[in-house]
Image (spheres, helix red, strand yellow):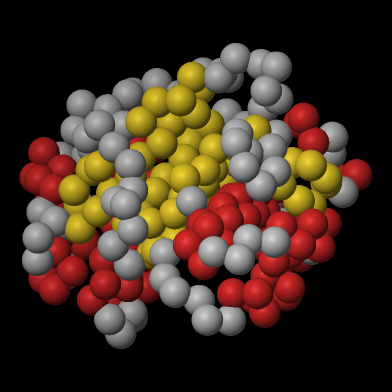
Amino acid sequence: MASNSVMSLDTFIRTVTAPPAEFAWAWALERPLSDSLRVSIVPALTGIATALPREDELILWFGAPQTGAQETLGGPSLSSALSDDECVRAMSFRFDADRWAFAAAHAGLRRLLGPMLGCAPRALRFRAGVNGKPCVDDNGRDAAVQFNISHTRGCVSVAVARRAVGIDVERRRELPDLMAVARTAFASEACASLAARPEWGARTALFYRYWTLGEAFIKATGEGIAQDLKSFSFTQEGEPALTRVSAAWGPARRWRFCCQP
């Protein structure tokens, strides 16, 4: 990417080492706990790695809005960072905060992948892979790298690895119908552990632990909601891990996770 394009990204994205405190987040990676893993957090969108991640490496990037970015995003700052189709999709959002989130996540992904694949970031092409999960289109083949993005108002994230990976970031908010949502979306074990926590703060934190881990997992597998959110469950405290998973995506030790609820 040309230097003026990097500068245009800097005008609307601020790289952070982790999502701000009001956000919950998690990642999922198809790599057993018994295997070594190096997690690298990208400190800036300039001077980033130009090589594909190693087999034992997970690369993460987090972004937040620059001051005023959500109100002024558009024009050159978009066209220099996104494809024409992405520009159109970004500008279709009604609210500035949603427009920023979409644009920042996709621009950050392009800025990370471009140098790794020896391609100008804006020239990268993507296509739907297995089950519709996006992948880099390398002349009709899948590139030797996998990725996932997540965006919400005020925070975006990207994960890049050589194996199946998923990431999720969510802004925490009060949920009056928390248990109703849980009974719809979570396994019975998760619902039981939530109901057993009478203190509202602890129950909300556990809810977001399950929510972000589940989202990251179904994004990593590429199945999405078709995976049946009740077909797996997670530990309720400590280092996150699957306690149960369907045979199609097992065994549980096949996956590793990290979360900040």
Residue at the farthest bottom position: 94
State the image coordinates of residue 183 (x, y, percent, origin top left): 73, 73
Give the farthest residue toward the front: 198
Q: Residue sitting at 51 percent across and 67 percent down? A: 200
Residue beneath the point at 24% across and 53% down: 64
**Which quadrant, please, contains the N terminus?**
top left
Q: Residue at x 37, y 73 (%)?
A: 89
Q: Position of residue 92 (x, y in %)?
A: 33, 80
The foreground one among 140 and 25 is 25
Residue nearest the observer in this picture, 199 or 118: 199
| The quadrant where residue 98 appears | bottom left
Q: Image check: 106 left or right of 259?
A: left
The residue shown at (26%, 66%) is 100
Does residue 244 appear in the picture of this structure?
yes
Residue 7's spot in the image, x, y percent?
Answer: 10, 45
Q: Position of residue 198 (x, y in %)?
A: 61, 66
Judge from the rendering whether residue 11 lies leftward or rightward of residue 80; answer left or right.
left
Which of these two is toward me, 121 or 172?
Answer: 172
The quarter of the picture where residue 50 lies is top left
Figure label count:
0
Task: Work out whether residue 123 can be spotted.
Answer: no
| Residue placed most toward the observer, 202 or 148 | 202
The answer to whether residue 11 is above or below residue 177 is above
